Image: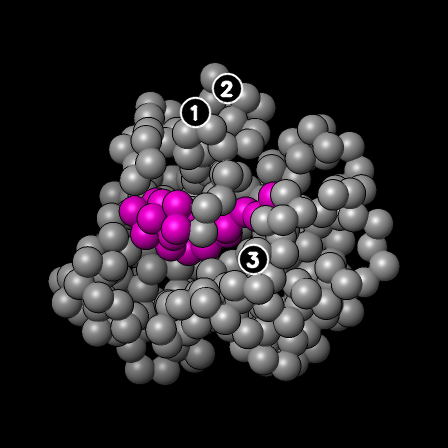
């Protein structure tokens, strides 16, 4: 049986304040030694994720902007499985990358978000409304990283000023009436015109099974934005364990929950699973 790992980034593999993965170094090295595919699944953009993918020395595709696209760096596993479906190559830090588009284009999302604000009376501020310095301040990013966060293709992050909980259902309803989805992430809401992280991850899981036969999937995340792909996993892990059981689906009620948040919790979970009795093929 082959182990395949899918992971969210912010507040999961990455520290929510420093965006460092260093506390997960031991587990990352253990996965690498076992040649375990590690797929990054995030609301982050291609511009943000490509350098991290290279820094971590990964060789598998990754999921950008909450499932709006699958990115295949040069030489990535599964690239041949999607041949003929990939968009034109885009520049990357380690050669050209190919993208499989799964979502509504960005400019259409920006226009729809303005309409949703008008329909609901909510004071909504999207990334398109923010300057680079605003994104840097709110998200705790450097100016360079904030510029990468604004370079979007399939997903518009936004803030609801005032009392967002009072307007949550209205915002979701206004999005749904346009064939879109509004979901809460760890720091921002996100408007998207695709089926989310679950659809993108499901496509990859199917192809890993085609290549490896029997696989055991592990997924790690920290927020409701991650639940759709965690529900597909054989072993879902909620990093930080901050969510009450009443908001979890039946499939996630028995998810593993780490005490520690961020990369320390990630490290704890992966090392524990690797030391378990799972029959993992090296």
* Above or below for 89 versus 192: above
Does label 1 or label 3 sit earlier along the sequence? 3
- In this figure, which residue is indicated by the disc labeled 3? 28
* Front position among marks 1 and 3: 3
Give the percent coordinates (x, y) of residue 59.
50, 39
Residue displayed at 17% across by 63% down: 143
Q: Select label 3 or label 2 by which is in front.
A: 3
- Using the image as rendered, state which of residue 280 and residue 89 is in the foreground: 280
Q: Quadrant of the N terminus?
A: top right
Residue drawn where x is 74% and y is 43% of the image: 282
- SS type, badge 1: loop
Q: Which mark is residue 86?
A: 1
Q: CA distance from mark 1 to mark 3?
A: 29 Å
Element type at marker 2? loop
Q: Are marks 1 and 3 in contact (CB under 8 Å)?
A: no
Q: Position of residue 147 (x, y in %)?
A: 20, 55
Query: Mark 1 and 2 residues: CB-CB less than 8 Å, in contact?
Result: yes
Q: Nearer the viewer, residue 268 or 228?
A: 268
Spot occupied by residue 173 in the image (x, y as percentages of width and height): 46, 60
Picture quadrant where residue 138 is located? bottom left
Q: Residue drawn 53% across and 66% down?
A: 24
Q: Residue at x 50, y 19 (%)?
A: 83
Q: Secondary structure at mark 3?
A: helix
Question: Does the magenta segment cover residue 178?
Answer: no
- Residue at the spot of label 2: 83
Tell me where the magenta segment starts and ends, as one range: 36-55
> Alpha-carbon neighbours of circle 1 within 10 Å: few (<14), some, or many (≥20)?
some
- Give the percent coordinates (x, y) of residue 245: 70, 77
Q: Are marks 3 and 2 in contact (CB under 8 Å)?
A: no
Q: Is residue 57 above or below residue 222?
A: above
């Amino acid at each position: 049986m082959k182990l395949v790992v899918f992971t969210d980034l912010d507040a999961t593999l990455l520290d929510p304040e420093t965006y460092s993965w260093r506390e997960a170094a031991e587990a990352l090295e253990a996965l690498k030694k076992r040649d375990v595919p590690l797929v990054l699944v995030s609301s982050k953009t291609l511009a943000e994720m490509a350098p991290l993918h290279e820094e971590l020395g990964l060789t598998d595709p990754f999921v950008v902007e909450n499932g709006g696209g699958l990115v295949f760096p040069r030489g990535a596993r599964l690239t041949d499985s999607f041949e003929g479906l990939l968009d034109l190559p885009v520049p990357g830090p380690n050669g050209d990358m190919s993208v499989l588009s799964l979502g509504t284009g960005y400019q259409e999302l920006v226009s729809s978000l303005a309409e949703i604000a008008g329909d609901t009376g909510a004071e909504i501020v999207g990334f398109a409304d923010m300057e680079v310095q605003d994104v840097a301040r709110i998200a705790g990013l450097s100016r360079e990283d904030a510029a990468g966060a604004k370079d979007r293709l399939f997903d518009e992050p936004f803030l609801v000023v005032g009392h967002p909980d009072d307007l949550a259902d209205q915002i979701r309803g206004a999005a749904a009436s346009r064939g879109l989805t509004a979901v809460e992430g760890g720091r921002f809401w996100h408007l998207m015109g695709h089926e989310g992280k679950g659809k993108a991850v499901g496509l990859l899981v199917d192809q890993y099974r085609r290549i490896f036969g029997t696989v055991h999937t592990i997924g790690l995340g920290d927020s409701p934005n991650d639940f759709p792909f965690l529900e597909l996993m054989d072993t879902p892990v909620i990093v930080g364990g901050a969510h009450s059981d009443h908001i979890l689906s039946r499939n996630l009620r028995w998810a593993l929950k780490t005490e520690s948040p961020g990369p320390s919790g990630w490290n704890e979970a992966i090392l524990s699973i690797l030391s378990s009795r799972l029959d993992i093929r090296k």
